[in-house]
Image (cartoon, rainbow, N blue to C red):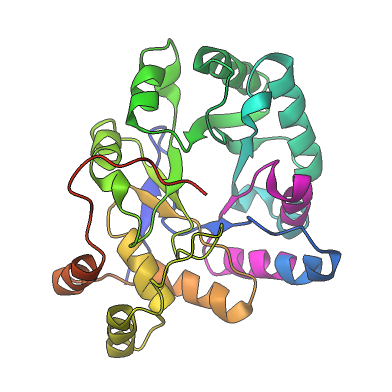
Amino acid sequence: MSVKTVQFPNGSQVPAIGQGTWFMGERDSAFRSEVNALQQGIDLGMTLIDTAEMYADGGAERVVAQAIAGRRESVYLVSKVYPHHAGGTKAVQACEQSLQRLKTDYIDLYLLHWRGTIPLQDTVVAMQTLQQAGKIRQWGVSNLDVADLQELWQIEGGRACMTDQVLYHAASRGIEYDLLPWCRQQQIPLMAYCPLAQAGGLQHDVLSHPVMQQLARARNVSSAQIALAWVTRFDNIIAIPKAVRPEHVQDNAAALTLQLDAQEIALIEQVFPAPTGKTMLDMV
């Protein structure tokens, strides 16, 4: 069975399931196991790695640096800038510091982590400056809702945005009402963080739900694989689960070739229904 991939507007193709690094780099005792997990994931085809200057105050980027040492060209690297750094010289400095921690010359995709007080116009200019300097290849945003993206689209250069990274899993389907359709119309893929609903203090019982367990048993796979296959059932969504234990990395990678049928999808959406109207964008 073929591996699911997603294409960015500039033509770059990435696996539909990558690797997240939130909560990595926080403990020295976990450093080696975190590096090993990312390297295992790369070997298994999850070559997109997502990180941020915020994660462990740069600690996660240091973990990534070790994991991609000697194989930078085979990895699609995503990092994120704090809102209060997302303009002018602060953006350049933040990016340069990320590059130093990552021990690389460029970031493939650099995202505004969430919207702050710096105008989007200033962020677009900063991203263009970083692109022209060769420090980043492309840029995008995270945790922006439809109204924010529509505002961005009115700014000169704003439509160069490659993606919006948002929280999305079976128990958090608000983006399906308007954000996902709008991004599909603009041919902008979404990146789903917390696709297993297991981070940020807003845990849901997605993996332990009887229906997920039932589907997993029927397929002889894990409920995490079912959850990831559900998130990536659309052709424009990239999931970025975080894993450290080898068996969890293996599970996540195996979901790259798992396709749910219409009946399985319907069962999941029956127990985790989508909202029927506009909801606030979920964030953690």
Please report the residue visible at 41 percent of the width from the left and 46 percent of the height from the top: 282
Q: Vertical placement of 110 versus 41: above or below?
A: above
Nearer to us in this view, 168 or 1: 168
Residue 268 sits in quarter: bottom left
In this view, the residue in front, 52 or 65, is 52
| 127 left or right of 147 in image | right
Q: Nearer the viewer, residue 235 or 73?
A: 235
Along the line of sight, the residue nearer the viewer: 253 or 22: 22
- Residue in the picture at 21% in, 68% down: 265
Q: Could you tell me which residue is drawn at 28 percent across and 30 percent down?
A: 186
Count of numbered badges drawn on the protein: 0
Residue 49 in the magenta stretch? The answer is yes
The outermost residue toward the right is: 28
Q: Which percent across, then down, holds residue 273?
A: 22, 61
Q: Is residue 44 above or below residue 96?
A: below
Please provide percent x and percent y for residue 161: 44, 27
Q: Which portion, as a residue range, is magenta?
A: 35-64
Residue 70, given in percent of the width and then of the height, sits at 75, 55
Specify whether 35 is left or right of 197. right
Q: Provide residue 101's location: percent of width, then percent of height.
A: 80, 43
Asked where in the image residue 128 lies, by quadrant, the reply is top right
Instruction: Answer above or below: position of 224 versus 230.
Output: below
What secondary structure predominates along the stretch shown in magenta? helix
Res 6 seen here:
yes
User: Taking the image as drawn, is residue 12 in sight?
Assistant: no
Looking at the rendered image, the quarter that the N terminus falls into is bottom left
Taking the image as shown, residue 249 lies to the left or right of residue 237, namely: right
- Which residue is at the far top? 156
Q: State the image quarter where residue 248 is shown.
A: bottom right
State yes or no: residue 44 in magenta: yes
113 w.r.t. 74: above or below? above
